[in-house]
Image (tube, rainbow, N blue to C red):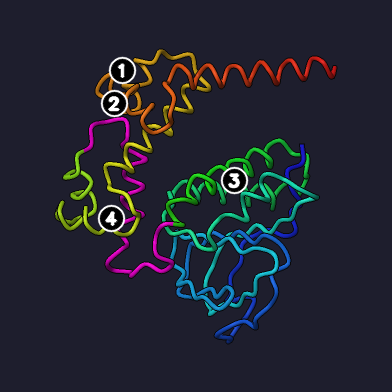
Amino acid sequence: MKLCNLVSYGVFNTNQHFPGKKQTAERDVPCYEIEYFFSTTGKAIINGRAYELSPGTLLCAKPGQKRMSLLGFQCYFIHLSFDGDSPYKAMLEETPNYFQIIDRDAYGRLFESLIGHLLSEGYDPESDFLNARLLELFYYLRRDTESNRNCPEQFDKTRYRFIPQTVGFIRENYPRKITLGDMASAVGYSPNYFHQVFTSVLGKTPQQYLLEERIRQSKLLLAHSEKTLSEIAYECGFSSQSHFSLQFKRLTGSTPGQYRRRCADRYYENESADTSLS
């Protein structure tokens, strides 16, 4: 299975590649450039807009954009292209240029694993390991697109740094009972101030973000496990199966049971199609 073409990949250190320089010349972006920054004091400028880079942020530049950088920084990078139409190509076109609200540990582990494999084993477009990691990356980008699209292009470093911390806290603790006070305390703010700023930045309350994360996780279990609805409800942090079912239908328009049946129907349709082609 080939998902895309890797144009280049590796670890980039501007001090080594541009010694003594403060910025790069503007250039046309030839492919999709995905870069995860782990050390930086620089900025990326895409189509005239400046993005202040910081450790644990991610860039996704697209073909045809114009780009330059204010140095310096270190990052993992994967530059890729697609043959013809691809759902992943369409997905990347819809992503923001700059991701600030991400699970930094998860992205860091993913890029370290992916780049480490490529540097040691080389590039094989049919590699199951490589394509599994790329699919994981595409999943994270799709998952995090909405939150990063809704937030300001540029966080104030001191005022808004708690937003990615809160998102990480929610994704790590969604199975247990979490109050507004718990979230505010985890990032060191008063509940009222925390609620006000989080809502103004993301366009949704912290409680709504928590609920959406629980529903997202429940969808995975409904589609890929045989656990009962009650087990899924408690595993995803809901107080009861009835509360889970009520919130699930409110957000998705269908009950958990209907969603699970649709997933099963798609599976059997695909299996039947595969059989007819064999």
Q: Residue furthest right?
A: 278
* Real-space Cα separation, disc 4 to disc 3, in angstroms: 26 Å
* Viewer-closest of 74 and 94: 94
Mark 4 vs mark 3: give the one in front: 4
First in sequence: mark 1 or mark 4? 4
**Residue at image coords 47%, 66%:** 39
Going by the numbered disc 4, the residue's amino acid type is: Phe
- Calculate the distance from the C-alpha at mark 2 to the C-alpha at mark 3: 28 Å
The quadrant of the rendering that contains the N terminus is: top right
Q: CA distance from mark 1 to mark 4?
A: 29 Å
Q: Where 72 sits versus 94, above or below?
A: below
Above or below for 246 versus 16? above
Give SS at disc 4.
Answer: helix
Q: Write down the region rendered in magenta.
A: 150-178
The amino acid marked with disc number 1 is: Gln
Task: Mark 4: give few (<14), some (14-19) or many (20+) Cα within 10 Å.
Answer: many
| Three-letter residue code for mark 2 | Phe
